[in-house]
Image (tube, grey):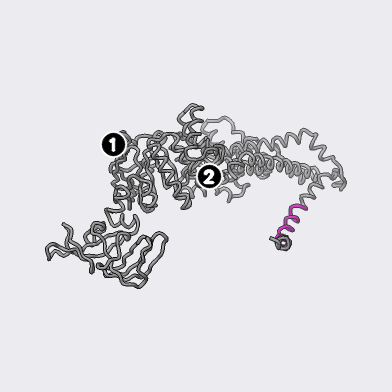
Amino acid sequence: MSFLELERVAKQFGTQTVVDDFSLTVGKGEFVSFLGPSGCGKTTTLQMIAGFLDPSRGAIRLEGHDLTVVQPAKRGLGIVFQSYALFPHMTAAENVAFGLEMRRVPRSECRERVRATLAMVGLAGYEERYPRRMSGGQQQRVALARALVIRPSVLLLDEPLSNLDAKLREEMQIELRQIQRNLGTTTILVTHDQNEAMSLSDRIVVMSQGRIEQIGTPQETYERPASAFVSQFLGKTNDFAATIDRTATPGRLIAGSWSAPAPAGLAGPVTISIRPERIGFCDAGLAAKIVTRIFQGNHWLFQCESECGAVIVIRQNDGQPQPAEGEAVRLAWRPEDMSLRRAGDAA
Amino acid sequence: MSAAPATDGRDARTAWLLTAPALMLFVGVLVIPLAMTVMLSFHDWGQYKGIEPVFILKNWHEVATDPYFAEMFWRTFRIALLTTLITAVLGAPEAYILNRMSGRWKSFFLLVILGPLLISVVARTLGWALLFGGNNGLVNKLLMSLGLIGSPLPFMFTETGVVIALAHVMMPFMVLSVWAALQRVDPQIENAALSLGAGPFTIIRRIVLPQIMPGVLSGAIIVFSLSASAFATPAIIGGRRLKVAATLAYDEFLNTLNWPLGAAVAVLLLVALVLIVVGSNALIERRYAEVFR
């Protein structure tokens, strides 16, 4: 099952630990994203897999074989760089053919594979163009073709879409996903863009300060964030104080005027974490006043001042009348939509 | 758009007005003396009559037919070409290594490379003379006392000596030129080639070198033209025994006092250099236009 395996990998620069205790197994054909803010160690981890950096500790294995003893040039991985790093003195076709030439692929086969790969990324007819004369999106496609033509065991993508404008980025996301599905190439994507990670990946590795915060499917990480960091990094989230009252039986979880049966385990002051789109306006519940109401096309964004502090609410623009600014409302949510942790715990 | 011509006219006048001082300086100190030198090369000269302001081709005929001058010019361009080759072969790797150094060492060695530019060419060339000048040169003395060589290494008054000293003087220009080209190279590009399976030698030859070639060539143009017109180094190392075009023109002007002949040599050197530089520049631009525009 495990195709690429990282076991307790760490990287230190001098006294600074950039990546620590990074363990992950990636299945064949899987698309995994490393997601985190800049400086979280995601690119460093990618470079260790690529072989541009040596891990200070830990092991990296590909199909059970130690990868760290293999020269970067012999690892057979395809890499797309943030800057694309195309060879400016070579045409698109020459760029793509470079990896095949290094593998001494016969000329006729090489020509055919270059043509097919460029066609696959939608660049048929651009063979003789130089990178300088191509748009950012086209350069990106050449870089992808150059990485894929060598039929890499693993495709590594280092923020490949961050230099494209929003619309093009969305198109490339869809295309990238389709290409990856069709080829079945095991892929690792490094990104700081949560939407990109969620729309592309089978699993997301959320990283912060060199450590893994959570590994899970996009849905898991979004809906069951393992830590406050994850919930805040992936979309908007509300955190507010509540208490669990165990004096009555059964115990109650109380946040202002809102309450629900207490879950097992916790007691005393707790923090409730809940997504803004899971909160509704009801007849009973947490008392709040709407401070600002922002129309965002397909949804409304409400900033409310509640008994327990500031709360953001997002409602679908489904044609129903929405409360106005300054209006007093009651907020409620289903207990299964929230997550609880002991007050004061960071994660 | 309809108002554009009127504005253009005024803009053009303003532009001329603003550039006038610099233009006058340029005409006054460069164009006029140059034109006078060209004129001078057509004048007559005699041992006793001095310069005669007539229009004759005597000097040009002499320069064109006397093999002495041909030899002089061949030597000049041979020295310049060898100097250019040495600076390119040593300077390009030097710049590449410099570019790969980490922060502090990089600035330190950049200073080491640029340092010689702060010292007068004459002082630097005299340094070579101190090291290799005949029996008294430090290196020659040392090598002879160690018994490694029987007689002093021939350095002074040899073409080899001039080329080595010139290459030393010109090295910073080549290193800087290549270094500037390296700054434009994507730092990830070597990793990209590495990930595609290229070895270190292939990366240098197929990826790095083609990208810094324009830098090497523009450095070569600078070094070649400066070496071909260099005066101090050939004058000190080559002396009277090994003349080049620049020292020849100097001698004609100040020793023989045959200004018109000196002018003809100087103008020919200038024209030859301009042709070579413009020609190779056009070649480079054509060769790399598609890639580096």
Region rendered in magenta: B15-32
Q: Nearer the viewer, residue A185 or A95?
A: A185
* Mark 1 surroundings: few (<14), some (14-19) or many (≥20) residues within 10 A: few
Give x and y (percent) for residue A38: 39, 53
Amino acid bearing label 1: Met
On screen, residue A298 above or below A35: below
Residue A108 drawn in magenta: no
Question: Which residue in the protein does label 2 denote?
Answer: B182
Amino acid bearing label 2: Leu
Identify the secondary structure beneath mark 2: helix
Q: Chain of mark 1?
A: A
Residue depicted at x 36% and y 66%: A321
Q: Nearer the viewer, residue A274 or B176?
A: A274
Q: Can you say which quadrant of the picture contains the C terminus of chain A? A: bottom left
The numbered disc on residue A1 is 1
In the picture provided, is B137 more to the left or to the right than A101? right
Give x and y (percent) for residue A174: 42, 46
* Mark 2 surroundings: few (<14), some (14-19) or many (≥20) residues within 10 A: many
Give x and y (percent) for residue B73: 72, 37
Give x and y (percent) for residue B241: 70, 37
> How many discs appear?
2
Q: Can you say which quadrant of the picture contains the N terminus of chain A? A: top left
On screen, residue B85 above or below A337: above
Q: Nearer the viewer, mark 2 or mark 1?
A: 1
